[in-house]
Image: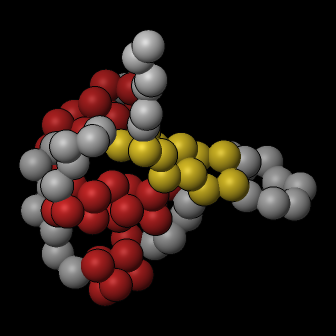
């Protein structure tokens, strides 16, 4: 029998709000510590922390997908 074991990073927002109630990232088993840190930065942005605050806390992180992500967002909003 195959068991599908995954790791997940989940944020659940309580109370009454029109914002996202649950944000969940499924993490690959072979994720490096650096990739995990990038994921944490993305989670912080997703739940509403300001860019400056996140960068002051986590420091500069070279995100190899940043330019690709910006291009995808531009396609969505144009």
- Front residue of this view, candidates 24 and 16: 24
Where's residue 6, x and y in %?
42, 37
> Which image quarter is the C terminus in?
top left
What residue is drawn where x is 33% and y is 55%? 39
Where's residue 22, x and y in %?
66, 46
Looking at the image, the residue that sits furthest to the front is 1
Where's residue 61, x and y in %?
16, 68
47 sits left or right of 56 in the view = right
- State whether residue 69 appears in this view: yes
- Front residue of this view, candidates 75 and 36: 36
What residue is drawn where x is 55% and y is 64%? 48
52 sits left or right of 21 in the view = left
Looking at the image, the residue that sits furthest to the top is 1
41 sits left or right of 22 in the view = left
Residue 72 quadrant:
top left
> Which image quarter is the N terminus in?
top left
Tell me: residue 55, above or below residue 8.
Answer: below
- Front residue of this view, candidates 3 and 15: 3
Residue 63 quadrant:
bottom left
What residue is drawn where x is 82% and y is 54%? 17
What residue is drawn where x is 31% and y is 86%? 56
Tell me: residue 6, above or below residue 8.
Answer: above
- Front residue of this view, candidates 2 and 31: 2
5 sits left or right of 36 in the view = right
Tell me: residue 42, above or below residue 69.
Answer: below
């Amino acid at each position: 029998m195959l068991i599908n074991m995954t790791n997940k990073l989940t944020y659940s927002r309580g109370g009454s709000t029109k914002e996202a109630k649950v944000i969940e990232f499924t993490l690959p088993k072979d994720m490096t510590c650096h990739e995990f840190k990038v994921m944490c930065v993305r989670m912080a942005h997703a739940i509403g922390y300001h860019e400056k605050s996140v960068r002051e806390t986590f420091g500069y992180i070279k995100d190899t997908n940043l330019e690709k992500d910006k291009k995808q967002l531009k396609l969505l909003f144009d």
